[in-house]
Amino acid sequence: MSSSTAQAQQADGRSNAGPRDSSLRANERAQQLINSDPKYKKYTQQVEKCLNAFDNVHEWADCISFLKQLLKTFQSYMQFKEIPHKLIVAKRLSQCLNPALPAGVHQRALDVYIHIMSVQGTEGLKYDLALWSSGLFPFFEYASTSVKPTLLNIYDTHYLPLQANLRPVMKSFILALLPGLEEETGEFFDKVMSLLDRLSGTVNPVFFIQNIWLIMLTMPSARGTSLNFLSRRLPRLQSNEDITQIVGRDVGLMFRAFAAALEDDNLLVRRSGLDLLLQCMRLDSAALKRVSQDDRVILMRAATGVVLRRDLSLNRRLYAWLLGADEKSDAQIAYLRGNGLDLLKDTLLTEMLLPSTEYSESRPFKVFISLLDKWEIGSPLTEVLVYDSLKALKSHMESSNDNKGDIVMTANSLYEAIDPSILWKHLLASIVNNVIGEEVSFEAIDMTIFVLRTFSDHEDDLRRIHLPVIFAAIVDAIRFDILQDQTRIARTAIAKAFMLLEELLHHLNPDGLLSRPNLTESQQDLVTTLSSLSYAYAFYGIEAPVQTSRNDETTLPLATVLCYTLSLSHLCAQGLLSQSGDSRYFRDVINRVLPFLAELVRLVSKAKVTAVKLSWDSSEWLSSILGVLHTADSDFVTVDNIVSVVILLHQTQQIQPKLNIDERATMSGMVKTLFRFLRQDYSIYHVRAVNLVWALEAATKQPHVESIISRSMTSLESRNVQDAYEAFGVLWRLTEDDVLPGVRLKVPMMIVLETLKNDSPSLRRVGETWMRCSLKSYSRVLDPLLHDLLDPSIRRSPHTFIVNDRKIQGYVYDRSFDQRYVNHLLEVLYAILQFGGQGFSKATRSTPIKRTYYEGLASRLTAGRFDMEGTYMDVIVDMLSRFLQSEPKMPHGQTMQLLNVSTHTSSVDILQAIVSRGDIDVLAVETIQPAVIGKLYACVHMKHFDMQNKLLHFLHSLISISVSRTVDEGHDSNGASQGSTSNYAVNPLLIHTITDGISIQSNRSLLQHWLDFVMMTVPQFQPALRVLVSPVIECLTRQLRVELVNIKAQGSSATTRVANDAEFTMLLNALERLVVLHMGAKDDMRSDEDAVVQEKPVHESGGLFGYVTTVFAAENPSSSEDQVGNRSPGFKYLYDGVRVLLALWRNLVWNDSQEWSPEKDSLALVYHRTRTRCRRAFEHFFHVQPVELLECVIDWWDREPLDPANPLEDDTVFELVDVLIANAQTAVHMLCECILSRTPSSSERGKRNVANPNLSDVILFRFLEQYLGRLEGPIALQVWGRFLSLTKEVASSTREFKMQFFLLLKCFSVLARKVMLTTASEDKRLKKDLQETYSRLLDSCVTFVGRTSDQTSWVRRPLKDALNNGRESPLPRIASDSRLNEKDNVNASSTSLTETKYIGWNSDLTSQICSFIAEVGLPNIRTFLVDNDKITNTCNNIVYYIVTPAVKAKAKPLDVDPMLIDILREMTKIPAALKVWRSSVADMLYDSRLFTSSHVLAKKWRPIVKVLFDTDKTAFSELMGKIVATPSSNIFTNRDQEMLLRAMNLRRLAFVLFAGEKNHYLTQLPTVQEKLVDVLRNVTSPLVQSEVFLCIRVLLCRLSPHNLTSFWPVVLTELYRVFDQALVNVPADGSEDLQLLLAVSKCLDILLTLQTEEFQVHQWIFITDTVDAVYRQDDWVPQGMLDQLSEAVGALPLPEAKQARPTSQLPDEEEPQAAIYPTYGDSRTARQPMLVKMRQIDSARDLLPFFSHVSIASYEGVYACGSNVDWSVVEEGILRDMFDSR
């Protein structure tokens, strides 16, 4: 084809809508007319002149004039069949059919259409069908009543004669006519129906129906009219006919159309859809049964979804479809079961298990609930779905999702709606299969537990009937299974079943176990004969898989269950005793059975029955159960369960025959077994074991426990005796005082006390250990002793004795009494006094006698006229003085005197022990002391325990005498005590002996002796024994850490020994006393330590690397420890002690939410008491050295965070600070003082020395910030004044920026936010101080960012590089406060904290300041700076110093640091800052490099751009003014540059529109449309026109489709024009037109993806939008423009050099072409554009896959996705085209 022909065709706008060969022939005829007939040229000129007049149309009257003139011109040249400029004529006629114009204009336009079609005839219309139909098809819906007849006449007269040629336009033609079927009584209803019938006859009726299905699927507005047509024309599908002959080959299309109608939002559409289903597609039809399961599921899902509308009319139609036409319920249920129940179940179950993302997960469950309202549907559906639905609910509720609340609510509703009989029927059958079957999965048991725990059980019938029946049946099933094979008792199923039984027991009503519910009349006789399982089967109507028999005589379910459970426990016990099989399984089962049995027994005790008769041998059962206690591998859990059950059975009176344990042999076995678990190895069970012992003692009438304990303590075997004493000690220590253990266990107590004076070292050691570790309080022991010593049988009277003529007052015994027993008691008291020492004295002196819990003692004291207001010591002294002064009367003198002397002796010994001490020779001390130390050291390591206590006492006495003698000699020789202790030399072995004695685990039973020795010796002789302090403290801290690790690991290892509360208390007592004693030690003590402890070598660094090491020294933990070691020894001891105390404080926090187990009681006791003791130690330290302690705590908080990933979240440290410091004011004051001591200021005088130079002010500021953040508003107001003074003092010290300014700003912001929430925010002075201070700090930080010396490098560096440079903070760990512009010469070891400079701080600090401004500063600026002027000034500084330099320094305007975007985003929220940031953002937007940035950054700039155009009313008009359509008049203008500038302005407009929300720029739409039309008309550059189509794509995404109605003629005309030009002349490779072709293709791609109703009537012009896209006829000829383009481009020859384009040469980010097309295998996939990844093409062949696949891809997208569009992909594709295209 010649170029002249192509140009002529382009000028005429000649259509190529028909096949390619036909259009060529038409073009040839037109060319002949042009060349041969001058009248045609004139005709063309007249039409062109008339069309130009349309530009002057301003009102509807002008339109009528234009149309009259145009029609007159056409009528003047009727001899020509061709219409000149038909493309423009079609556009103008479409515009004249705008619904906003009056009917007169529409009538004139239709007259023109009629004339044109009359002139062209059928053949001409066939070729130009696309041009004239684009205006006529959409018009019928909006046409007035007067115009519609004319339009219908056009359809009838000119379109229907086209016959088969209407096939490509069939869908659009039907869409055009369907609005006439909205009202059955409408004026044009019959006419339109007739037209549709005739239209169906022009093509295959099947093809016509398929287009109806497509319309229903894609056009929501046309579904109602489509259903109106189908209800009259679609035949009823018979059961045996082939439906493809009626509805087409694609049956799935019909089902999806029905589904779309049933899911429509319009209620009438849904109703019509259901009516059509009832009319044409019954549930029992063969048509429905022959289609695929997926299609049936789609239809059923949509149909059942109508119940969610809760409309009676919809529900009635759905029920009719599901249940059939029969009105009888039985027939309806049978119809549902035979035709749709399986489909309904599969549909709901699929949705439950695999929920769609299109709707909530609860939707299928809500449908199920709604269907339950119809009994005929709900009953059979519940039978087949209830179990699976609960399983799906369980899965959803256990998974973590955001919509869990809706699922929980729906689950409860479903549970309440389901018939309990059906639910528990299925659960019972499944549970029994789990129990008696061989399944390894226990889904039914887990499901039942889930149901019981999740759903409320307030229904009485459930708790009284169903649960008791299920409960008894499960127990019977377990019994039956075990009776078949006793080895099956060890199966996991049995343990799981008992878990379920325990859960059931918590929910059922106990009254339900007292009788069985009634059966049917025919089965009522079986109530008393059936077993529990068989009865349950009969009750629920389940066919019994097994038959069980009864073995009990009672019909009471509770008795039956109890009897079966007792039998099971008996079988388990026999299995353990026989050692058959693995005993672990039997033990696991018995530990399940026994707690369950205990719950049953408690239930019996509460039941309203007088007696529960059981068929059991109680003695045999008790014998076998107690036999388990004596097995070698019995654990405490088993023992606990056995003893608890036995006690319950003994105490329950209703059970007959009754179990009796009030016998010595029975009690002995249980008590001895419990005592075995009171050994130290089982410390975690002690509390529970003690409780069980006392429970046994309370359950019996005889004192069996006291007798058994006494017998075990007097055993002949030494090992047994020691264990008995240890166990009794634990029992004694863990028993509360009000239980009176000394009275109730008097005999064992006396046995223990007698060991204190026993000759056996082993027994004496055991007794002393018992006293030290288990005594708890002396009042327990003294109460029974004093009670017996004050026996009323000891009667005395006052008497005056005359001795050597002097009168002495005394007493005489009135009668004889048991003196031997009294002497024995006094000896015991003396032994206690000797042992107790100062502790005994302190306890007796401080305890009033009236606090005793023993009423018998109080009555005897009153009778003996003792002072009840006195202490125990007062009573003892008074009593001893009476004994001492008492003599027997003469009648009894001979018999009582000898024993009375012993009484006196004992009394004197006791009194002497209270008031006296003894001496030893110094020479003997110097000789014996080394030997004693050596012997003691050997005993420790050889595990000789008996001698250690005596040796320690002896050693203490020796040291006491040695030191006292040395001091005396020093006084004698020097006349002063200073330096005298240096003569005493500590034996080097002593240090090792002490540390080993404390730390060796085997020596732990004597720990208290060693700690007593240390705490008594070191403080008493402190100057001489100072060298012991450091190693002992290190040893104590190490032991505490070891015990902490052990107690935290006890859950993972049963063999791990756990320290009890007494051990922790011992270690903490010693640590506290030693640390407090030596906190004030002087530096000269270090020389004494050096004599014993070897010094660490000191390595000096030099050279360049030495200086670098010095700079980073604070980051090295080892160097930090060295700094701590170089401080005063007292502070070092404090630091070490605080570290271990803080570790205990943090880790020993008891969590009560843990599941209970026997060891939890003991662990809770240890945790609470140890933490309480730590608190007392902290309080003591704080009282002595408050500041030093606070700094130690903060240093530890910084070094050992609880969570390294989030070190600031550690509430335990702040909890401790609140405990130590009385109020927040004091705490803040102390922190401020610590900061000031490290901050250089104008005055350095008066500052205290820093105890911890390693603690920098950075750490202190961080801690202060966290502390302030935890304060409440009123408390924050109290500390405001002190913190403000700190801020002013630091800020006033210099005018230059210091790093403390930023740290102060962060703390200030935290505190100010809290203060401004209080009523004090109205105080003018406070507001003034806050504004001035905050403004100064913030401005200083902002100025620093702008003026920092390395700002240029900072603004070009990403934030992650600025923050990830090897440090967590921009400041070093040493004192940091330095000026940034000072020279560096830093002495890191100096405590004066000189100013420091560190390379790299500036960049890190600036990044953190900017981040703070974005996250805290700007969001709160209106709260802090109320004045708009101050806000404006501050924002102006931020823009000037931070934003503007950062933007200007970037090669790409948008490629700035993300935190700067955050700053601008926050600033846009401040109205007063509008003028500040507006110019910067506008400059960025109009920068020529704008679109070189990444689309990712553009997303972040969108809200900022939106706010700019929302707040600045002139911004949009200014932008529109930059888009110029007319060419420049300057002859020197570069045309290419001018076109590029226009294109960029258009793209800038597209970005602004894209930044808005939906319909955000609706008011500016007319201006935008006018500008785009102007550019299209006047600018022919492909580059500029490509940007116009980009703007159109943005408008399609940002505006509702109905708002673009007036714009459609222009869009369609331009699309048609570009594709028509491509058909006539395919752009050559490398041509500029290729990018325009790509832009137009992308625009059409978006339109096909969105599938708007306004475009669907036109899309046939470009693609094949009918089923022909998939099922093509043999004689199919492409009609759509893209289908024709596919053939035209495909016919182009490939260049030789470009036969195969490698993947590597594809455009950036573009994948191979085959990968750009979406697949719709998943029916729930959303539609996506096909060209979303294509940015640029080099040849039209690059678009060939798009042209050839677009029709079928569009059809499949509609078929699979319905109306779902993947908007994220659509918008990201547009954004990428703006910013990432080349």
Image (cartoon, rainbow, N blue to C red):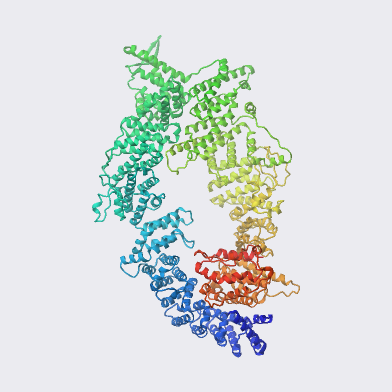
Q: Is residue 226 above or below residue 1256?
A: below
Q: Would you say residue 456 is visible in this rendering?
A: yes
Judged from this view, the residue extending furthest toward the right is 1532
Q: Residue furthest top?
A: 804
* Count of number-bearing discs: 0
User: Where does the C terminus fall, quadrant-wise?
Assistant: bottom right
Q: Nearer the viewer, residue 781 or 888?
A: 781
User: Residue 948 location in percent, x, y?
Assistant: 50, 23
| Residue 1564 in view, yes or no | no
Against 1389, residue 813 (above or below) is above
Q: Is residue 768 left or right of residue 526?
A: right
Where on the picture, by quarter, is residue 1458?
bottom right
> Which quarter of the picture shows residue 1202?
top right
Q: Position of residue 1445 (x, y in %)?
A: 69, 57
In the picture, which quadrant includes the N terminus?
A: bottom right
Q: Taking 1272 as reference, is 476 left or right?
A: left
User: Is residue 1639 found left or right of 170 in the rendered image?
Assistant: right
Residue 1080 versus residue 1658: which sits nearer the camera?
A: 1658
Residue 1759 place in picture, x, y as percent: 50, 69
Does residue 724 sit above or below 457 in this rendering? above
Residue 291, percent from left and from top = 43, 68
